[in-house]
Amino acid sequence: MSDLTHMSIADALKGLESKDFTAVELTQAHIDAMAATKDLNAFVTETPEIALKQAEESDKRREAGKAGALDGIPLAIKDLFCTEGVQTTASSHILEGFIPQYESTVTAKLFADGAVMLGKTSLDEFAMGSGNTHSYFGNVINPWKGSDAKDLVPGGSSGGSAAIVAARGAMGATGTDTGGSIRQPASFCGITGMKPTYGRCSRWGVISFASSLDQPGAFARSVEDCALLLNSMAGHDPKDSTSAQKDVPNFAAAITGDIKDLKIGIPKEYRMDGMPEEIAKLWQQGAEWLKDSGAEIVDVSLPHTKYALATYYIIAPAEASSNLARYDGVRYGQRVEGEDLREMYENTRSQGFGDEVKRRIMIGTYVLSAGYYDAYYIKAQKVRRLISEDFTKAFEQCDALLTPTAPSAAFAIGENEDDPIKMYLNDVFTVPASIAGLPGISVPAGLDSNGLPLGLQVITKAWDEETAFRVGGVIEEKASFTALPQTLSQKAA
Ligand code: GLN
């Protein structure tokens, strides 16, 4: 039954429909695969009993001719989405043991379409990080190994989701992306990750990091599968006033293979000094694939790119410091007692949060404090506007932008750990689109000389995920990325 874990969601839906296998069999195969990949530490909480129960119900629905769009498909859920009755931690000690009484809108939609939940995946605490090394529940390990066989990070913050989809322990997964947390781990793990337009998916029931940037999205092993997941996840939600009143198009239908009418922009500012030669080459290769498929390649400029990281690392911590004020030991979450109220707050927050979260709270509080607010926070908001306008102008010349997803392949666990700035630099290609609220997809496009996957990113206009899927589909076809993580190919051999 092990090949059940290697198929796409699209094929699994066909197989379920033609009764080649049942949802229970498909789910059991994934539960077995999760057990076989336990050393990756991808999950904070596994929910095999819930999964099997959901799968049984799914089989009954299909029997009755009432199957939903994702009926019987086993998925992993990032542990930032509140799931009713199932522990939800944001990978933080402060939320350990928190059992929500409600379901996030995105997971509710997935379950309404019949999806099966395998468990809750680990992340960087409160989604702050790029390597999944900031989880209270330990590092997640990338199923890919470099030639020196060192343990590598899966990327972050949605590292558990990306790792388990790459390791064939789940057919797809939810993620959230504030500054790159879907696209960068997708690139590091050799899978596809889509962050839609800000407002496309409801944030209701998603634990907040930076509310003006946070956006749920999808991981899968193909562009089409990501489109299928996003179709289920997206849509207006009256419970989230920032979710848009927009119709959700059929994203999968947009993957036509035909990009002849498209202009693809190559932003010159993304040619950073020190970009590894292999990444520059792959980027060039990607442009050639698109050109060969009939698209026109144009050079464009996003002049404020160099300010994007600094802007993000002011706005995101500012919002985080305000959002995380709610963890005070009174309302919910862990409490550590003290002599008086003030000491209880101090004890709770200093023991409940990890170092990176504390760093962000301190930076955020600083940039919001009287005297610095204008110099940092307001300035960053102004630059945010300039960065958005750069994209608006660029999209007068082209329909989509092609860039590398990340400036490196997966790095070793422990690397970059002593230097937060180096860690923040991981987001250099993903953060600008986040700041502007634009959709971005990362598609695996090749391997580096060390045998590690590299992704290419396609960014489009707001609400034009369809073009991102369309261009992503062509990259996927041209790259024909079939490599498997070494940990899996060794087992298969
Ligand atoms: N790596 C970025 C950060 O640490 C992005 C995280 C995210 O998108 N959640 O903030």
Image (cartoon, rainbow, N blue to C red):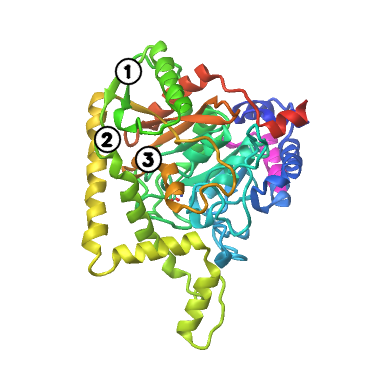
Q: Which of 170 and 242 is in front in this view?
A: 170
Magenta segment: 53-70
Where does label 2 land, which residue?
391
Q: Do the residues labelled 1 and 3 touch (CB within 8 Å)?
A: no
Above or below — where is 75 with respect to 322?
above
Identified at 41% across, 39% down, the residue is: 196
The prevailing secondary structure element of the residues shown in magenta is helix
Q: Are marks 2 and 1 in contact (CB under 8 Å)?
A: no
Depth check, mark 1 against mark 3: the one in front is 1
Q: Is residue 274 visible?
A: yes
Crowd class of label 2 (few under 14; some 14 to 19; many from 20; radius 10 Å):
many
Q: Position of residue 193 (x, y in %)?
A: 50, 36
- Which is closer to the viewer, label 2 or label 3? 2
Q: Is mark 1 on a helix, strand or loop?
A: strand
Name the kind of residue labelled 1 in the image: Ile
Per the image, the residue denoted by label 1 is 297
